[in-house]
Image (spheres, grey):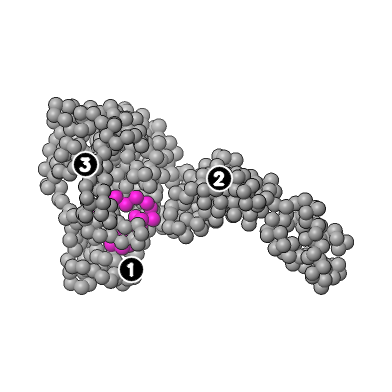
C-alpha cells in the first residue's frame, strides 16, 4: 500500500523493536582485478580495462588474486572472525546487463571469514555488532541510464554499460541481526559503518571512500511488535554511500514500516533506493531469496586453503586498530570522554591527525575541524571530510593565526574562501585583503578616533578601571572591519591614555 504520512519516530519505537542487518561492500585496493590481470585504476576510458575473463568470454579461465585473499583474511582477523581452513567460490546466477557472464563469482556457504564481532560506541554506550561472515567476490560493471528524469532505468531513453569495474575485488561483510538498540538503531548503524570504515583504512586494504563507491552499505530493516520474538519482513535499502545517509535510511524505514503496519498493511520484501535530497526511500524490485540465485561451486577455481602459519603471520602484522588508537590519542591529547566523543561523532580523527602532520598544533587542529568546519558540514549536510578543503590548508590557516597574520575572525573568512574555490589560504588572504593590521601608523588614527568618540570610557580607564579598555578595543576592531591586531590596539590605547596595563 502507498504511505503518504510517516509515523513519527517516537511513535514507531513505542510499538515496535527495530531489527537491522547491514551488508557492507568494500572495494579492495588491489592493482588488478579479482580473477584476471586487468587494471583497477580509476577514471580510465570506458571498457578499456577489460579482457576475455572479466567479459565472460567462452573458454576464458579465472585465476584468484592472492592479494585479494590476503586482504580478506586481514579484514576477517580485525573483525575477530574465524578464518576458514578451506573455502571455495560459487557462481551466483542472475541476469543483468552489468554482469557480462550472467553470474557473479562470489562465496556462498563457505566464506573466508565468519563468526566475528565489532564493538561500536554511541554516546559512551558500547554495542557489540556480531559479524555473520565476510566473503570475497567481484564487482559488477557500471550502468548509466541516459534520458528520463531520475537517472534510473525506468523512463530512460537508453543505457550504456562500462565493464571496467566488472571483476574488481570486493569483500562483503554481513552482520547478524542487530537487535536491542531501540531508538538508537539508526545511530548504531551509522557508528558501525564508521567504525568499519576506520578499520578498513587502518588495515590499508582500501581507501574506503564512500563518496567514490569504494564502500557501500545495504541497510536491511524490519520491525517486530515489542515483546515478540519473530522478526518482521525486511526491506533492503541498497548502495547507501555516506555515514549520514546510513542513519537517515534506517530512520526513514523505521517510520515507513511502522506506518504501513499501523494501517493494517504488510511489508513487501524488496530492495529500495535511497534519495539523498530528502532522506526517503522508494521501491526498487522484489527481493530474491538465496535459492533464486541457483548458487553452485565455481568449477574453474580451486579451493582457497590458507595455512594456519600464514594466518598467524598476518595476525601478527596487523596495525594498531582504531579502537586502540582512539584510546591512545585520547591520552596524548588529554581529552575527556565527552571531548573525545565529539571528535568521534564528527568523524574528525583522520583530518585532525593529517593537519597535525602538516605542522599544526593538536589543539588548533581540533579547534578548526570541530568548530568552523564541523558547523559548515552540518549546514550543508555533507560529511566533514567531503568538504573541499585539505588538512594541509587547515594547517596553513593555523600557521597564519600563530604568526599573527590572521585572527580567528579573519581565519574563518579565509576558510570560507578556500571552501568557495578561491585558492590556497595565502591567495585568499591576498585577494580579500584579510591580513591583520598591526602597523602603529595604520592603527593610530582609529585608536585616536575611538578615544575621542568615547570620552566617558577614556576617563574610566584613566581613573584606573583598565578593564573598560575592551570597549575601545571593540570600537577599533569595528572601524578596521576586524583586521586590527587586538593586542596591539590595547597597548596603543593605554599608551595614549597614559595608563599602564
The residue singled out by tag 3 in the image is: 98
- Residue 14 % position (x, y): 30, 71
Q: Is 247 in the magenta? A: yes
Residue 325 within the magenta-colored segment of the rendering = no
175 over 171 or under it: above or below? below
Mark whose residue sits in front, 2 or 3: 2
Residue at point 34% right, 60% down? 279
Between label 2 and label 1, give the one nearer the viewer: 2
Which element carries disc 2, helix, strand or loop? loop
Residue 34 figure quarter: top left
**Which tag, 2 or 1, sits closer to the chain's start?**
1
Q: Residue sitting at 19 percent across and 63 percent down?
A: 267
Q: Which residue matches tag 1?
A: 9
On the image, the x and y values in percent for residue 291 come to 12, 47
Q: Which residues are magenta?
A: 236-253
Instruction: Give the residue number, with chain letter if any, for mark 2.
Output: 423
Label 3: state its secondary structure. Answer: loop
Picture coordinates of residue 98, whole percent (x, y): 21, 41
* Quadrant (top left, top right, bottom left, bottom right) of the C terminus: bottom right
Q: Residues within 10 Å of mark 3 (few under 14, many from 20)?
A: some
Amino acid at each position: 500500500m502507498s504511505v503518504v504520512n510517516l509515523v513519527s519516530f517516537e511513535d514507531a519505537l513505542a510499538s515496535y523493536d527495530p531489527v537491522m542487518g547491514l551488508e557492507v561492500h568494500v572495494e579492495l585496493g588491489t592493482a588488478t582485478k579479482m580473477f584476471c590481470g586487468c587494471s583497477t585504476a580509476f577514471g580510465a576510458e570506458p571498457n578499456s580495462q577489460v579482457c576475455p575473463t572479466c567479459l565472460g568470454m567462452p573458454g576464458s579461465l579465472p585465476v584468484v588474486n592472492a592479494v585479494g585473499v590476503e586482504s580478506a583474511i586481514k579484514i576477517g582477523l580485525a573483525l575477530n572472525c574465524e578464518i576458514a581452513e578451506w573455502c571455495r567460490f560459487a557462481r551466483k546466477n542472475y541476469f543483468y546487463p552489468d554482469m557480462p557472464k550472467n553470474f557473479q563469482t562470489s562465496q556462498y556457504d563457505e566464506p573466508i571469514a565468519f563468526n566475528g564481532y565489532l564493538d561500536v560506541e554511541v554516546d559512551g554506550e558500547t554495542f557489540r555488532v556480531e559479524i555473520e561472515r565476510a566473503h570475497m567476490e567481484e564487482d559488477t560493471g557500471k550502468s548509466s541510464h541516459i534520458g528520463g528524469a531520475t537517472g534510473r532505468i525506468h523512463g530512460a531513453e537508453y543505457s550504456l554499460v562500462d565493464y571496467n569495474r566488472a571483476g574488481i575485488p570486493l569483500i562483503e561483510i554481513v552482520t547478524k541481526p542487530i537487535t536491542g538498540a531501540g531508538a538508537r538503531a539508526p545511530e548504531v548503524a551509522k557508528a558501525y559503518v564508521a567504525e568499519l570504515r576506520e578499520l578498513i583504512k587502518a588495515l590499508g586494504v582500501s581507501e574506503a571512500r564512500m563518496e567514490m563507491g569504494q564502500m557501500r552499505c545495504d541497510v536491511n530493516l524490519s520491525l517486530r511488535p515489542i515483546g515478540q520474538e519473530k522478526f518482521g519482513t525486511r526491506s533492503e535499502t541498497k548502495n547507501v554511500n555516506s555515514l549520514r545517509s546510513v542513519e537517515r535510511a534506517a530512520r526513514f524505514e523505521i517510520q515507513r514500516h511502522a506506518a504501513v503496519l499501523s494501517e493494517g498493511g504488510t511489508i513487501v520484501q524488496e530492495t529500495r533506493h535511497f534519495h539523498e535530497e530528502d532522506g526517503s526511500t522508494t521501491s526498487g524490485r522484489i527481493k530474491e531469496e538465496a535459492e533464486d540465485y541457483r548458487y553452485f561451486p565455481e568449477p574453474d577455481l580451486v579451493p582457497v586453503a590458507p595455512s594456519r602459519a600464514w594466518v598467524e603471520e598476518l595476525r601478527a602484522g596487523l596495525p594498531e586498530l582504531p579502537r586502540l588508537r582512539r584510546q591512545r590519542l585520547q591520552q596524548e591529547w588529554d581529552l575527556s570522554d565527552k571531548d573525545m566523543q565529539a571528535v568521534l561523532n564528527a568523524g574528525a580523527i583522520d583530518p585532525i591527525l593529517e593537519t597535525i602532520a602538516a605542522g599544526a598544533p593538536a589543539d588548533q587542529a581540533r579547534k578548526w575541524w570541530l568548530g568552523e568546519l564541523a558547523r559548515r558540514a552540518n549546514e550543508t549536510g555533507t560529511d566533514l571530510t567531503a568538504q573541499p578543503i585539505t588538512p594541509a590548508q587547515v594547517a596553513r590557516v593555523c600557521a597564519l593565526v600563530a604568526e599573527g597574520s590572521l585572527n580567528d575572525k579573519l581565519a574563518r573568512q579565509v576558510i570560507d574562501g578556500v571552501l568557495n574555490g578561491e585558492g590556497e589560504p595565502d591567495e585568499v588572504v591576498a585577494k580579500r585583503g584579510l591580513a591583520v593590521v598591526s602597523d602603529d601608523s595604520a592603527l593610530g588614527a582609529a585608536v585616536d578616533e575611538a578615544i575621542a568618540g568615547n570620552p566617558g570610557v577614556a576617563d574610566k580607564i584613566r581613573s584606573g578601571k583598565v578593564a573598560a579598555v575592551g570597549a575601545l578595543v571593540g570600537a577599533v576592531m569595528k572601524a578596521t572591519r576586524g583586521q586590527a591586531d587586538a593586542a596591539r590596539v590595547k597597548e596603543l590605547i593605554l599608551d595614549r591614555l597614559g595608563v599602564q596595563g
